[in-house]
Image (cartoon, rainbow, N blue to C red):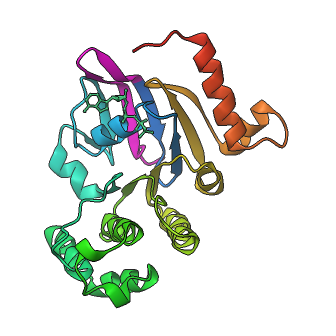
Amino acid sequence: MCPPPAIATENLTKRYGDAAAVTDLDLTVESGEVFGFLGPNGAGKTSTIRILTTLTEPTSGSARVAGHSVSDRASVVEHIGVLPEEPPLYEELTGREQLEYIAGLRGYENWDRVESLLERFGLAEDADRRVGTYSKGMKQKVGLVQALLHEPEVLFLDEPTSGLDPRAARTVRDTISEVAAADTTVFLSTHILPVVEELADTVGVLYDGDLVAEGAPADLTDDVEAGSTLEDVFLDVTSEQEHERPARR
Ligand SMILES: Nc1ncnc2c1ncn2[C@@H]1O[C@H](COP(=O)(O)OP(=O)(O)OP(=O)(O)O)[C@@H](O)[C@H]1O
């Protein structure tokens, strides 16, 4: 029997006043896959992620994550890890204290894993310095480690390689491959399309709150023309939409 999808939304809608950010979104992400969530600025990606991670409520429609309704915040939060655009960190804690604090909140006491992740992300030497003294990239790495520390079923990553140097970005991509190989579902939102091309099993393109293309990267690129890239798909789909629909806002 197939496991239930890791993420399933039905008619999911988010409005801010009169402005629609997400409109009747029907999205299914199968368990264990890496889903690349693309879309131009303002398409509604962050709003969708905020609903799926229970940070905001939908205006209408429904969503389930790891088998639980997003209205059941406690159950969803237990099964997910989140790296938002701005990682939530306590500047006054050291890197190690930050991770120990988050691990403690989750009742996760595998300190060896904390140490090995610090090592892996090149943070071990600076682990006893305050987070407030870290560079943007170091904060991003601590944010990622705290998102995946407790081995969540579903990992939400919003621009995970933002601000990282090439070596750190490589570590992040390798880490995503590894957690995906260990059956974690990864919901990956990024504008860096080669990362999606490398890692995603399925890609969805959001435009003005609607899902306008979805499929395996190779199928989507074949639909444009042989030899094209995901960037070509993105440009093709979004310019088609620009011509087809009047500005909604
Ligand atoms: N708190 C808010 N109040 C009002 N409007 C909002 C709010 N958050 C988002 N929006 C609007 O909703 C729409 C979708 O925004 P969202 O941040 O979800 O897009 P995005 O795809 O994540 O964009 P980006 O790629 O630029 O991060 C935009 O028009 C944005 O201005």
From the top left corner, tell me how far across and down residue 176 is, in percent. 50, 64
Residue toward you, 79 or 136:
136
Number of numbered discs visible in the structure rendering: 0
**Horizontally, is 20 left or right of 183 in the view?**
left
Q: Nearer the viewer, residue 246 or 148?
A: 246
Residue 115 seen in the figure: no
Q: Which quarter of the rendered picture does the C terminus lie within?
A: top left
Which residue appears at 85% of the width and 39% of the height?
Answer: 226
Residue 231 spot, x, y in % from top left: 68, 41
Which image quarter: residue 111? Answer: bottom left
- Above or below 201: residue 138: below
Q: Is residue 138 left or right of residue 181?
A: left
Residue at the (49%, 66%) spot, across then down: 164
User: Extreme right residue here?
Assistant: 226
Percent across and percent down for residue 169 are 53, 67
Vertical comparison of 32 with 24: above or below: below
Q: Which of the 4 image quarters holds residue 185?
A: bottom left
Is 24 placed above or below 204 here? Answer: above
Nearer to us in this view, 12 or 45 = 45
Residue ID at (43%, 48%): 3
What is the x, y in percent for residue 69? Answer: 25, 38
Does the segment drawn in magenta span residue 230?
A: no
Highlighted range, magenta: 1-24
Q: If the picture is divided into quarters, which one holds ligand 1?
A: top left
Magenta stretch contains residue 3: yes
Quadrant of residue 98 within the rendered picture = bottom left
Type of secondary structure dominating the magenta stretch: strand
Asked whether residue 134 is in view, the answer is: yes
